[in-house]
Amino acid sequence: MQTFEIQPLRPLLRHWADQTLKEFWGSTCIMSRWRYHETKDLPAFIAIQEERPIGLATYCLEGDSCELVTLNSFVEGIGVGEALLLAVRDLASGAQCKRLWLTTSNDNLPALQFYQKRGMAIVAVHPGAIDEARKQNSKIPVLGYNEIPCRDELELEMRL
Ligand SMILES: CC(C)(COP(=O)(O)OP(=O)(O)OC[C@H]1O[C@@H](n2cnc3c(N)ncnc32)[C@H](O)[C@@H]1OP(=O)(O)O)[C@@H](O)C(=O)NCCC(=O)NCCS
């Protein structure tokens, strides 16, 4: 039984979302494909359990595409990540988008497993994209998950 619910981010929880993104990703400004997203300005969904936020997905609708900019679950393995992904997918479908897409880094094997098991396919590899981004933002770690060198950007998509 699902013990949480998914809701659009309310203004009251915007501060929590900003702080959370800052703590997890080092900034509210997230880069993908050479573009910076200020997540403070993006719409989002949150997962709520007993009035406590336990997950967050920010996204950006543009033309007939929707980019999942960030996805975080703070209670893993109970379906929060999947429910947030489905909420963004359903919203994108409803907005007549043809494509839901995202980028992640080559070291993030848990995320690559998670997304591919949920219908997303790797459609492009951008070798060295993270190394290049690090030249502008030294906070981007050299080693990522499991000490894997963090170098490339992988682009995944789901056709809608
Ligand atoms: C990737 C991430 C979003 C997944 O979130 P999550 O809440 O753990 O995702 P889910 O619970 O939906 O699914 C995770 C696993 O738990 C399993 N699961 C889901 N509900 C379950 C339940 N009720 N009981 C037991 N297991 C369950 C799923 O089957 C899944 O396993 P699988 O991938 O082998 O199929 C999360 O690990 C995360 O926040 N990572 C850090 C940030 C990140 O890397 N984000 C993505 C890159 S942008």
Image (cartoon, grey):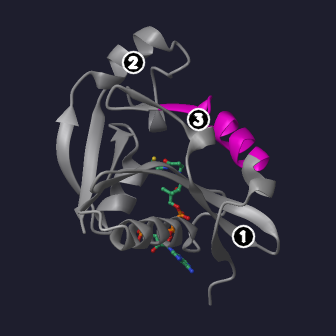
Q: Who comes first in sequence, dot 1 or dot 2?
A: 1
Side of 58 where 149 appears, left or right = left
Q: Amino acid at mark 1?
A: Ile
Side of 2 where 83 appears, left or right = left
Q: Position of residue 16 (x, y in %)?
A: 77, 48
Viewer-nearest residue: 46 or 64: 64
* Residue shown at the point (29%, 61%) measured from the top left: 116
Magenta span: chief secondary structure: helix
Question: In which quadrant of the rendered image does the C terminus lie?
Answer: bottom left
Q: Position of residue 145 (x, y in %)?
A: 47, 38
SS category of the residue bearing label 2: helix
* Vertical side of 10 occupied by 142: above or below: above
Q: Who comes first in sequence, dot 3 or dot 2?
A: 3
Question: In which quadrant of the rendered image does the N terminus lie?
Answer: bottom right
Q: Which residue is mark 3?
A: 25
* Vertical side of 108 occupied by 27: above or below: above
Q: Amino acid at mark 2?
A: Ala
Tell me if residue 99 is in the magenta stretch.
no
* Vertical side of 38 occupied by 58: above or below: below
Q: Which residue is mark 2?
A: 133
* Residue shown at the point (61%, 34%) measured from the top left: 28
Q: Who comes first in sequence, dot 1 or dot 3?
A: 3
| Mark 1–mark 3 CB contact (< 8 Å) | no
* Residue shown at the point (64%, 71%) measured from the top left: 7
SS category of the residue bearing label 1: strand
Q: CA distance from mark 3 to mark 2?
A: 14 Å
Q: Which residues are magenta?
A: 15-30
Q: Crowdedness of circle 2 by 10 Å Cα count: few (<14), some, many (20+)?
A: some
| Mark 1–mark 2 CB contact (< 8 Å) | no
Q: In the rendered image, which quarter is residue 139 located in?
A: top right
Q: Which residue is mark 1?
A: 48
Q: Amino acid at mark 3?
A: Trp
